[in-house]
Image: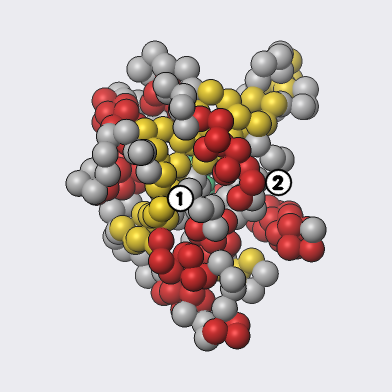
Amino acid sequence: MSRFIALLPAAGSGSRMASSTPKQYLPLLGEPLMLHTLRALATVAQIEQVVVVLSPEDEWFDLVETALAAPGDHAHPGHAALAQKLRVLRCGGASRAETVRNGLRELASTLDAADWVLVHDAARPCLQAGDVIRLIDSLQSDPVGGLLAVPVADTLKRADAAERVATTVSREQLWRAQTPQMFRHGALLAALSSCADSNITDEASALEAQGLAPRLIMGSERNIKVTYPADLALATLYLQAATSA
Ligand SMILES: Nc1ccn([C@@H]2O[C@H](COP(=O)(O)OP(=O)(O)OP(=O)(O)O)[C@@H](O)[C@H]2O)c(=O)n1
Ligand SMILES: C[C@](O)(CO)[C@H](O)COP(=O)(O)O
């Protein structure tokens, strides 16, 4: 029976956030942003391990450990599952792809090639467990794997050097990729290891480079990637809406 492991690349510097604190550690509703992400994955019963991949130079993760260790009456109900499933690796690389590849290599001795790995950005804290469960249910018998994504709803413009419209790009059959992206450990590690373009920005691209066609699974607009300062307010609203639903 294949297992399901979550792998969170969390070794970025958050340059677009323009903060001295890496964005994955910025406060969100009074807790480190990454803790919301970790909990969202740990509460999914099928996920056996939540592996976070940090930079070797990371000096911030104790913020998460301190929050996790909060005494009983202040503990979040999801912390027991997270404490039991959490594994920390300090092998992050210079790119997201390198971080994921290094994490997969570290896990190789403990996983079967057929085990599923759900790669999820630490910077996507508004992920809902229901979307992860739908991803797993939809793909666990798939020959390739796939990813959460949402169809493009806006008209798309390609800009010229002067930031004027050069052309309008058809949005037909265009989707915006999200995470988790779910692939079998052996296939994903092989694809990332042989992918010549180390600038690929998601796992699916590595499988596509092998001639494979990952499946697109409908995600949620709320599963935003916190990239720019304005995203923090939106993530706060989405998390508050989720807890009051
Ligand atoms: N070398 C890197 C770069 C990014 N990431 C992770 O990949 C996810 C998505 O990347 P992105 O949003 O680009 O994060 P940053 O690279 O930190 O942001 P920026 O590009 O603005 O510097 C984040 O959780 C980030 O921590 C990583 O693990 N290792
Ligand atoms: C993986 C991803 O979140 C899918 O949209 C995105 O490609 C990450 O891009 P980033 O520049 O590393 O944030």
Residue 29 - label: none
Q: Which residue is mark 2?
A: 222
**Residue at the outermost front position:** 1
Callout 1 amino acid:
Ile
Does mark 2 have its CB less than 8 Å from ligand 2? no
Q: Secondary structure at mark 1?
A: strand
In percent of width and height, residue 77 lies at 59, 71
Residue 47 - label: 1
Callout 2 amino acid:
Arg
Closer to the camera in the image, 217 or 93: 217
Chosen colour scheme: secondary structure
Q: Looking at the picture, does residue 55 appear above or below residue 217?
A: below
Q: Looking at the picture, does residue 113 appear above or below residue 158?
A: below
Looking at the image, is mark 2 or mark 1 nearer the viewer?
Answer: 1
Q: Secondary structure at mark 2?
A: loop
Residue at 59%, 73% (x, y): give it. 76
Residue 81 left/right relative to 156: left
Closer to the camera in the image, 21 or 186: 186
Residue at 26%, 25% (x, y): give it. 194
Residue at 64%, 25% (x, y): give it. 175
